[in-house]
Image: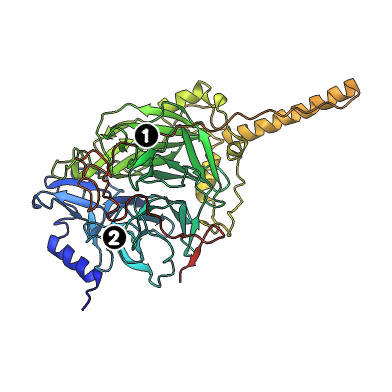
Amino acid sequence: MRRSPWICVLAFLLGSGLARENAPTADNFYRRVNPRATVFGNYLYVDGGEIAEKGNPSNRPNNPVNATLALDLSKSWTPKDAEFIETEKPDSVSPLWKNAFFHDDAKKTFYIWGGRIFRTPWGVPPPVKVWKFVADDKGGGAWSTEDDNHSFDDLVRSEDGAYVSTEDAGFWIGGSAFPETHTDANSDIPGVVSYNFTTKEWKNHTEAPFSDDGTVNAATATYIPSFGPNGLIMLLGGLEHTIPKATNHLSFETVHFFDPVTMKWYKQPTTGTKPQMRNHHCSVGVQGNGTYEIFIYGGWNQDYGKILDDMYVLTIPGFNWAKVDFDKDPRTEFDCVVAGNRQMVTVGGAGVFGGWTVKDSYPKGLGIFDLTELKWKDEFTPDAPAYRTPDLVQKWYDQGGLDRVEWSDDVKSLFAKKDSSSTTSSASPGATTTSGSTTDQTNQDLDKTSSDSKPNNTGAIAGGVVGGLAALALIGVLIFFVLRRRNGKAGEMVEVEQQPSEIDGRSVAASGWSPGMMPPPPRFPTASSGTPDSSRSRSTPGHAHLPSELSSEGERRAELA
C-alpha cells in the first residue's frame, strides 16, 4: 500500500519534535530566524520561521515555530521583558519557511503562501493552499484556509522571493522553486506574482527588467504610497540567481521600482554613499515631510562571505543614499517593521555560522531603533514623537542636493501632485479602488512643514518638479513669440537630449553561497563549505527549467472562489 507523502511528513515532524516553546524566556532564548512580521492596530504579529532555545538536543537545536505571536504596542516594554501572546496553529496549517507573506491592513488579515516546510523529507512540498490569519483586537486571531479548490495550481510555488503589500494586494517578486516548494521544480522563477485581496485573483506578470532573466532572490520590496498615481514598489538588493549556484547581486547603483496598478517598471540612478551589495537583509519605509525614506539593515554579502552589520537610508525623491553610524551588530535572515511612529522593531536574525546555540545579543531577538535619532533604544515607547527626516538626510536637501538630481521624464512625472479625489482603476492587477486615506495624507505632507521639524526645501517637490517644468515651458513660449514678432519669422525649437538614466552596477559572479548563518535545510550547502554546492540540483545538473507558467498573453489568471 502506497503511503501518502503527508503521512510521512507528519511522522517526520512528530519524530523530530516542534519547538519546545514558541516564545521562550529571555534566559532560555537563543535565536529566532526567518520570521515574518506585520503590525495591525496596537499589535505586532510574528509568524513562521525557526527558533532555538536552551534545552533542545545538540543534534536538533532549532525547530519550526508552530504558533502566531503578538506583542502589545499600546504599552512600553523592553525586549527582555516583552510578553508574547500566542495563537497556536491548527494541524491543518503548515509551519512555513521563506514563504510569501501578504498583509491586508484594512481587514487585519495576513496570508501565507509558497515556501517550504522546514526539515520535511526531500521532495515533499507544502499543500497547494493559501492560509489566512484574521487578527482580533486582543493580540489573537484565527487561522483558516483561504482557498481549497486548487484554482491556482498553474502558479509555481517558490521560496525566498521579495514580498510586499499595498492597500489592495500582495506581491511576490522572483524566488526559487525546488521539489520542497513545488513538485518536480528546480528553477529560479522570473517576474512578479500578485494576489488581489478583494477579487481573490492571482496573476503572473512577465515584465521584470531588474535583471537579465527577470529573476531575483532574497531581496526586499517596500511600498511607497506617497508618490506616483498609485504608489510605487521599490525593489532593493538580492541575488540574480541561486540555481545552479548563487551569483550576481543586484546593485544599489540603480534602483528599480514599479507602479502596483499599471505594473510599469521604472529605474533611477542613485547618488551618495551606496550600500555594499547584499541579500537576506531587512528594509522599512517611513513618510517624511515631503520625502519618503527607506532604511535597509544587515544582510549577507555573497561575494565576500560576510554578514553585514551596517544600515543605510535611501531618500525619495532625491534617490540619495546615506550611511547611518551606529553600534554594530551583524544580522541576517530577519524581519523589521515600523511601530510606534518612528521606531523600527527588528525581529529575529542569524549572526554567526552554525550559531543556533550562540545566544542572540538582542534579548528574545528584539531590537528597537529610533529612525529619527538614528540610535538603538532599550525600550519601546508607544507615544514616541512623530517621525522627522533625520538630520543626516535633511542636510543633503538643505545643501541643494535635490537640484542636482537627474530624473528621466517618466520618473519625474511620478512626483506630480495627485488629485486627492481620484481613485485607482478597478482593472488593476493589484487594486480595485482605494479611498486614498493614506495617500491623501502623504500628499498633503508634501506641501506643508511639520511643526516639530525645521523648514526644508522638499515640501514642494511634487509641484516643484512638474510645476517648474511647466513654468519654464511657459516662459519659453513667451520668449518664442517675442522673438518671432521681433524677427518676423518663426523660431526653431531645440530638443534637449536626455542624460542616460542607467548605471551599470552589476556585480561579478559570486564565489560563494549562503542562505543565512544557520545550518540550511537538506540539499543546501553548509556554511562551512565556502563554495556553492554542485550537487544542489541532485540528479539534474545545471539549470533545470520548469514548463512555462505563463500564457501566450504574458499572464495567467486564476479566479479563486
The kind of residue tagged 2 is: Gly
- The residue at which mark 1 appears reads as 277
- Give coordinates of residue 471: x percent, y percent: 70, 30
Which image quadrant for residue 9? bottom left
Depth check, mark 2 against mark 1: the one in front is: 1
266 or 420: which is nearer to us? Answer: 266
The quadrant of the picture occupied by the N terminus is: bottom left
Crowdedness of circle 2 by 10 Å Cα count: few (<14), some, many (20+)?
some
Q: State the image quarter where residue 283 is shown.
A: top left
Q: Secondary structure at mark 1?
A: loop
* Inter-mark Cα distance, 2 to 1: 38 Å
One can see residue 268 in this view: yes
Q: Which dot marks residue 328?
A: none
Q: Amino acid under label 1?
A: Met
Q: Residue at x 24, y 33 (%)?
A: 329
**Vertical order, 50 against 457 (above or below):** below
**243 or 387, nearer to the observer:** 243
The answer to whether residue 385 is seen in the rendering is no
Could you tell me residue 15's position as x and y percent? 13, 63
The residue depicted at 17 percent of the width and 42 percent of the height is: 354
Q: Residue at x 58, y 30 (%)?
A: 500
Residue 140: mark: 2
Task: From this view, report whether residue 83 is shown above or below residue 249.
Answer: below
